[in-house]
Image (tube, grey):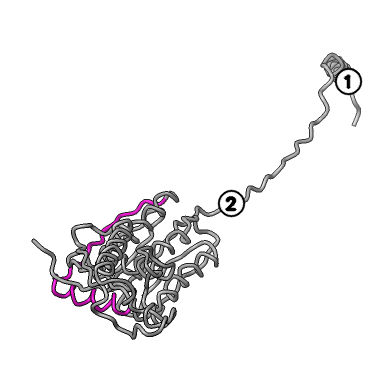
């Protein structure tokens, strides 16, 4: 088929228009690339990337809070029940020793732990010793730094010793709640008990020294053995505070009766003065002199005469 001249011209124009459009597109793309390059070159340099280091710190857990010392001790007859927790073995041993030294049996257990705050149970052990020696039903409880003691003191002397132990504990920084009481025996019971105890003291002195506490010849001064024995008699008199006692002085047979009578009274007074110096009330002691009238051994030998230079005690009801 033949193509007309006009149709061929139209095709040429369309081809030229397509080429022109393609050229315009390439020029536009070049312009866009130039603009992008210019914009990138005009921006400030970016800072280098940073590296973050993370440090992990491990914190040890805090040590446990110390536990307060705690001791519970209760006497039941000849058995002492113990329990609690202390800081060191020495403290535990001190408490156990206080019980065993009192001749009592231990029932229970005291735990040792280094986490325990030290309230010095060794001071408590000293307090415990007095409590166990002086009561049949004593009890002690240590809670932190407070000590509670209960029980019935057997007599005023034991109460004094317990009070001294309490003062020691307070001086060591402990707080002591003293709930002890003092047992007061009837006077008739005290008279018999005191006489028996004095007799035992004198018999023991006789066994150890070979004679009763005595005096040197013709003087009213006490011998060394006499003062040691009278120290124990003084404790007995304070242990039983209700009765009184006659202090009876004696001599050997040498010298005149009148002289010996006076000397026996002076010897009895020397004993009374010594006991008063130990804290025994003066109105509990009556001085009696028997001279040479009541020998207990033969005056024919020095040994016998030494035994006759003596004092005796007769416990009695107190006047008033």
Residue mark closest to the camera, 2 vs 1? 2
Could you classify mark 2 by the number of other residues whose Cα lies within 10 Å: few (under 14), some (14-19), or many (20 or more)?
few
Q: Residue at x 18, y 73 (%)?
A: 191
Q: What residue does disc 2 label?
A: 61
Q: Residue at x 51, y 64 (%)?
A: 91
- Residue 18 versus residue 49 in the image, above or below: above
Residue 146 in picture, x, y percent from top left: 37, 54
Q: Is residue 71 magenta?
A: no
Residue 63 in picture, x, y percent from top left: 56, 53
Classify residue 181 as left or right of residue 44: left
- Residue 51 versus residue 136 in the image, above or below: above
How far apart marks 2 and 1 lie (CA) works out to: 73 Å
Q: Nearer the viewer, residue 194 or 118?
A: 194
Classify residue 108 as left or right of residue 29: left
User: In this picture, which residue range is highlighted in magenta?
Assistant: 174-201
Is there any visible trace of residue 22 in the rendered image? Answer: yes
Q: What residue does disc 1 label?
A: 26
Residue 278 in picture, x, y percent from top left: 33, 58
Q: Quick one: SS at disc 2?
A: loop
Classify residue 20 as left or right of residue 122: right
Quick one: quadrant of the N terminus?
top right
Q: Residue at x 37, y 73 (%)?
A: 213
Could you classify mark 1 by the number of other residues whose Cα lies within 10 Å: few (under 14), some (14-19), or many (20 or more)?
few
Classify residue 6 as left or right of residue 172: right
Q: Is residue 176 magenta?
A: yes
Residue 49 in picture, x, y percent from top left: 80, 31
Tell me the tag on residue 46.
Answer: none
């Amino acid at each position: 088929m033949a193509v007309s001249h006009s149709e061929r011209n139209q095709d040429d124009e369309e081809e030229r228009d397509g080429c022109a459009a393609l050229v315009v597109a390439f020029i536009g793309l070049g312009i866009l690339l130039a603009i992008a390059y210019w914009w990138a070159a005009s921006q400030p340099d970016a800072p280098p990337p940073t590296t973050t280091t993370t440090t992990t710190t491990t914190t040890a857990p805090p040590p446990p809070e110390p536990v307060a010392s705690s001791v519970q001790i209760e006497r039941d007859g000849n058995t002492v029940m113990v329990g609690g927790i202390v800081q060191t073995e020495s403290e535990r041993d001190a408490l156990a020793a206080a019980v065993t030294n009192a001749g009592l049996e231990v029932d229970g257990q005291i735990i040792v732990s280094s986490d325990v705050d030290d309230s010095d149970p060794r001071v408590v052990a000293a307090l415990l010793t007095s409590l166990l020696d002086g009561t049949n039903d004593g009890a002690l409880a240590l809670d932190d730094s407070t000590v509670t003691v209960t029980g019935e003191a057997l007599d005023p002397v034991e109460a004094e010793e317990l009070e001294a132990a309490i003062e020691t504990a307070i001086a060591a920084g402990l707080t002591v709640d003293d709930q002890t009481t003092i047992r007061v025996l009837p006077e008739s019971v005290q008279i018999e008990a005191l006489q028996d105890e004095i007799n035992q003291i004198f018999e023991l002195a006789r066994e150890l020294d070979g004679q009763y506490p005595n005096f040197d010849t013709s003087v009213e001064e006490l011998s060394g053995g006499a003062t040691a024995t009278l120290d124990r008699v003084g404790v007995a008199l304070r242990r039983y505070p209700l009765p009184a006692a006659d202090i009876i002085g004696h001599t050997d047979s040498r010298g005149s009766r009148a002289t010996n009578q006076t000397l026996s009274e002076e010897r009895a007074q020397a004993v009374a003065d010594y006991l008063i110096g130990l804290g025994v009330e003066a109105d509990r002691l009556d001085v009696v002199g028997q001279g040479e009238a009541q020998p207990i051994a033969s005056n024919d030998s020095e040994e016998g005469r030494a035994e006759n230079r003596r004092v005796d005690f007769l416990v009695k009801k107190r006047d008033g």
